[in-house]
Image (cartoon, helix red, strand yellow):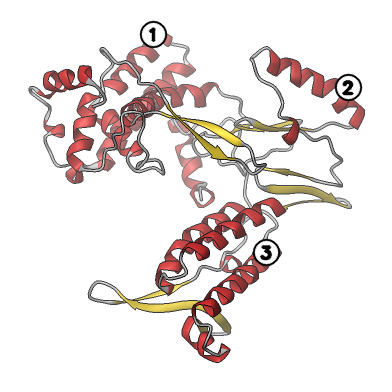
Amino acid sequence: MTGPARSVKAATVGTGAPPVFEMNWDQINWDQVNEEVTRLQVRIAKATQASRWNKVQVLQRLLTSSHSGKLLAVKRVTENAGKKTAGVDGKIWTTPASKLKAARLLTHRGYQPLPLRRVYIPKSNGKERPLGIPCMFDRAMQALWLLALNPIAETTADPNSYGFRPKRPPRQKSKVNVIRYADDFVVTGVTRELLEQCVKPTVEKFLATRGLQLAPEKTLITHISRGFDFLGQNVRKYGEKLLIKPSHKSVKSLLGKVREVLKKNMAATQAQVIMLLNPILRGWAMYHRHVVASATFTKVDHLVWKMLWTWAKRRHPQKNYGWIKARYFRRFAQHDWIFACSARGYKQLRHFVLFRAETLPIQRHTKVRGEANPFDPAWASYFQRRSPYAC
């Protein structure tokens, strides 16, 4: 898919292809595919628990060579947020035929990754973050091996470590001395002197041996009564009560995205604007729904309404306020000034209503048990009971 060597490989692998690769992509039974991959992952986790490392390797090779593993790996890289972003080869897989062909080509023999495509994305502090983008084939190979590595990682990982782990979202912050999510972490201590003279030098030494260092702009030593931001939320103690709220920076970032959408869509229909804004607003609210966010949700809804009112007035500078209200805002039960409209879609009339954060109920989150392993069948009923917390 990504070079001459892989084209030759396609001819070899395509000969006598298994029936699963001959069917249409849309006809694949994904429940069966997931079941087969999960069955192998459970066996890998059991072998890891028993320290049977030779069997772990055999099972990993079996999973990464299986049709189900290859299909699922391609499915994940062609349905995520980067599915339209190509690597150095400029290729993306958008058709069912290209996806099936890619799954056939995922093989270990002769595999060589291509260089990364380097791009730079802006950071909130004005700097740029370098980002390496692999080609689609390499991403699929990474996804394939992730299926085989996850059961081991989940079985042997720190029970209180969170970040890019299945069924452990970023809100899982426990009351321990070190709280870590991916490469972001918080260290708590009884005194400022302890943190400055002991903890910080120890952390710097630990990172230095690994070629890393603390980012000065993100490193802060502060008292809990003054609070600090972590993962888009502000953690602060008010008297004897600790409250976690959406941070001001997170709110500002959200409003900036809304403002950008409205600025770029001055000529768009109201329905199009609602469809663009709803995923942004709902995603942000879902992330913060487990903390003290009710007042912030109400404030955000009001600020978004003000931007929408300004957007509507600029579209019709010659119309009076009553006409604009009747054109863009509706009343539902006890709620007035709701940004909503009706538009005719394919053979039917559709109704579009802007999502309001304050309509999302606050749901306190229960921390996942540290020893819980999603690849261990003994914990299956536990994760099933926790399913309401998975969002």
Dot label at residue 54: 1
Pick the residue in front: 326 or 47: 326
Question: At x 54% / y 73%, what residue is drawn?
Answer: 311
Left or right: where 371 falls relative to 199:
left
The Cα atoms of the two marked residues, 2 and 3, are separated by: 39 Å
Decide if residue 65 is on the left or right side of residue 138. left
Q: Quadrant of residue 40?
A: top left
The local secondary structure at tag 3 comes to helix
Residue at numbered disc 3: 294
Disc 2 secondary structure class: helix
Residue annotated with mark 2: 197
In the rendering, at what x and y percent does residue 319 appear? 52, 88
Find out whether the residues at labels 2 and 1 contact each other: C-beta distance under 8 Å: no
Count numbered badges in the picture: 3
Q: Is the residue marked by circle 1 packed among few (<14), some (14-19), or many (20+) residues within 10 Å? A: few
Q: Residue at x 49, y 70 (%)?
A: 354
Q: Tell me if I can see residue 176 in this picture.
A: no
